[in-house]
Amino acid sequence: MESSSLQHTSLDLNLNPFRPMKEEVPKKELAGVLARADDHQKEPIKEEAGFLAEEFDRISSENKKLTEMLAHMRENYNALQSHLMNLESNNSNKEYLVIPRKRKLADQRTDDPYGNIGVQGNIECSSCSDEESCKRSKELSYSNAKVSRVCVRTDASNTNLAVKDGYQWRKYGQKVTRDNPSPRAYFRCSYAPNCPVKKKVQRSVEDPSVLVATYEGEHNHMMPPSRAELSLGSSQCANLGSVSSVSSMRSSSRPTVTLDLIQTGLSEISNKNSIEGVEGSTFQQFLLQQMASSLTRDPKFTAALATAISGRILDFTLN
DNA sequence: CGCTTTTGACCCGCGC
DNA sequence: GCGCGGGTCAAAAGCG
């Protein structure tokens, strides 16, 4: 998806078949109809009324179709969501078992519901006598911050360990670890010079098509403005985590669909979910993109949308 | 030219 | 104390 469309995508499909036509036809249009009626006084008004009724029927049926499609999509969405929840709970259990127990500090886990590792929680350095020797423990203090994990499905043949999450990362190391044949890449946030956030990315042992990104710390700056670039490659999809409310799903009683993907809206949603930390917002971004892309990829949806839009355009040009 | 990536060396904690 | 392994550093190479 292009960045421009991601910035602000608003689809008002007018799905309410029961909304009175008065709201549908702008006053200008009505004035135009009335004016024409005046111009052609001999023309029977009944004809005009019949035309409008026909239009009303047509738009109503379109709206009905779209409502049904929306309900269908919502069902699919709910099914997917529960499936993902199951997958993730299974996955986090597995990861919990796979983590090597060699180091004491690594065993000090947080009570993260995702089974994330609370690494190196103890930063007390009794042996450090001077500032130089304390350098290490200062680094460790970063890891005292939140640790979270994100799984991203990608092409197994793709050797690139980059996980696009909207931030700018600078790779500073790569290492082959003992428990995993695929190398682990180390990234630092390069957007802010003193941002303490680090990221480790490694392929999953069980499923090489899954990249496991471990975030340590919290960003001390805003999301880079080039965030729109976080667009996922077509080969990538997310192992989505918990799903929070999206504007399109907000109300079942109001059939008007608004996919409001304005940036501020996104960050608002992300901030609400601060408990989940970094992966929460990333998951939501992934989710929004997946929803948007599935909407645009659905030929039925696009066809119906095109019909609805062209109908409206025709109405305007004819009047 | 400046930024990023690569990669071997180094540091340090941990287990034996 | 020694070796192992994860994490980091920093020089060289690559890239736009």
Image (cartoon, coloured by chain):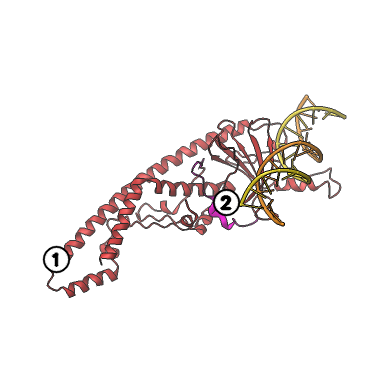
Chain colours: A red, B orange, C yellow
Residue A31 is drawn in which quadrant? Answer: bottom left
Q: Report the label total.
A: 2
Q: Write down the chain letter for disc 1.
A: A
The relative height of residue A201 versus residue A304 in the rendered view (above or below) is: above
Answer above or below: position of A148 versus A29: above
Q: What residue is shown at x 57% (from left), y 51% (from top)?
A: A166
Q: x%, y% of residue A206?
A: 57, 30
- The magenta span reads A220-239
Task: Give left or right: position of A136 versus A55.
Answer: right
Q: Amino acid at mark 1?
A: Lys
Which residue is located at x 62 percent, y 37 percent?
Answer: A202
Q: Which mark is residue A80?
A: none
Q: What percent of the width, then of the height, locates residue A72?
A: 35, 44
- Residue A228 is inside the magenta segment: yes
Q: Which mark is residue A46?
A: 1
Q: Is residue A203 above or below residue A313?
A: above
Q: Residues within 10 Å of mark 2 (few under 14, many from 20)?
A: some
Q: Residue at x 66, y 30 (%)?
A: A179
Q: Is residue A123 visible?
A: no
Quarter of the figure with residue A96: top right
Query: What element does badge 1 sit on?
Result: helix
Say which residue label 2 marks. A166
Amino acid, disc 2: Gly
Main structural element of the magenta stretch: helix, strand or loop? loop
A104 and A73: which one is in front?
Answer: A73
Please determine whether, in this image, residue A208 is positioned above or below residue A301.
above
Between C13 and A284, the residue placed more toward the observer is C13
Residue A56: x and y in percent read 23, 59
Mark 2 lies on a secondary structure that is: loop
Tell me if A308 is positioned left or right of A234 in this view: left
